Amino acid sequence: MAVEIDVAGVFITAADLTPAGTITAFGGGTAPAGWLPAAGSAYSRTTYADLFTVIGITYGSGNGTTTFNMPGDNGASYAFVETFELGWTLNEFNTAATATWLNVHLGNDGTDPTDNLTHGLNAPLSDLLVKILVSTDGTDTNSFEPVQGIANVTFGWEVGQVDVNNILIQTGASGILRKATTGTNTVIDTQNWYYNIAVFKQVPVGLYIIKT
């Protein structure tokens, strides 16, 4: 139910107090009455005269005479949501209880140095955010995010797509690096430490809309 305010005998709704051209995120799938998707589409200059007065042809002149464009390109609002987490996994890539971080894949199986990471999210790498953590004892308290890479390309790690449900996390031939509190790099090569991988998927959470 709309809230109405009596101002000098005239009832004004909250929508009336929102100026044309206001852009906001909206959780529904379609824009409500009095709003348009901020998705770059063209609309009538006369039908939406108030909005045209505010934004004009700032975001595009439409057909050049009777229409004008909205801001934005697809109108969607996105968020990265954590949908997969491996959990702390002991690096046993060399032998049981013996680690190596040199030229291995950080995958689901901490004993298989050629394993891929299966996340099962049915999404290309371009829609994913991958976070890699290392811990000295398998706890969040003593964890850190390793340095992804430096000029010396034999250190670090890289994420590549295998398919929409699998990624490959490759470490450098000389291992990975930790940035010490002194600002210098510490090599991680044979430490019996743990790793954890979280994968966040980009998902639409609503629309950006503009008041008409």
Image: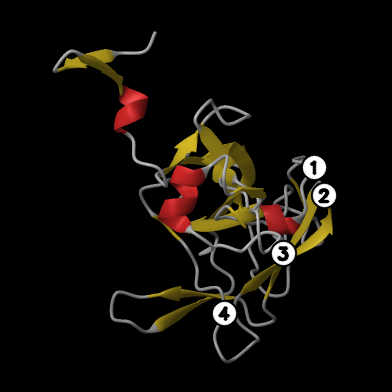
Mark 2 or mark 4: which is in front? 2
Give the mark, 3 or 2, whose residue is nearer the N terminus.
Answer: 3
Give the mark, 4 or 3, whose residue is nearer the N terminus.
Answer: 3
| Helix, strand or loop for disc 2 | loop
State the residue lying farthest toward the left: 8
Relative vertical location of residue 65 with respect to residue 165 in this rendering, above or below: below
Looking at the image, which residue is at 29% across and 31% down? 17
Looking at the image, which residue is at 80% across and 42% down? 122
Dot 4 amino acid type: Gly
Mark 3 or mark 1: which is in front? 1
Q: Residues within 10 Å of mark 1 (few under 14, many from 20)?
A: few
Tags 2 and 1 touching, CB below 8 Å: yes
Residue designated by label 3 = 94
Residue designated by label 4 = 149
Mark 4 or mark 3: which is in front? 4
Where residue 113 appears, as percent x and y from the top left, is: 77, 62
- Label 2 – label 4 distance at C-alpha: 25 Å
Which of the numbered marks, if any, corresponds to residue 164?
2
Q: Residues within 10 Å of mark 4 (few under 14, many from 20)?
A: some
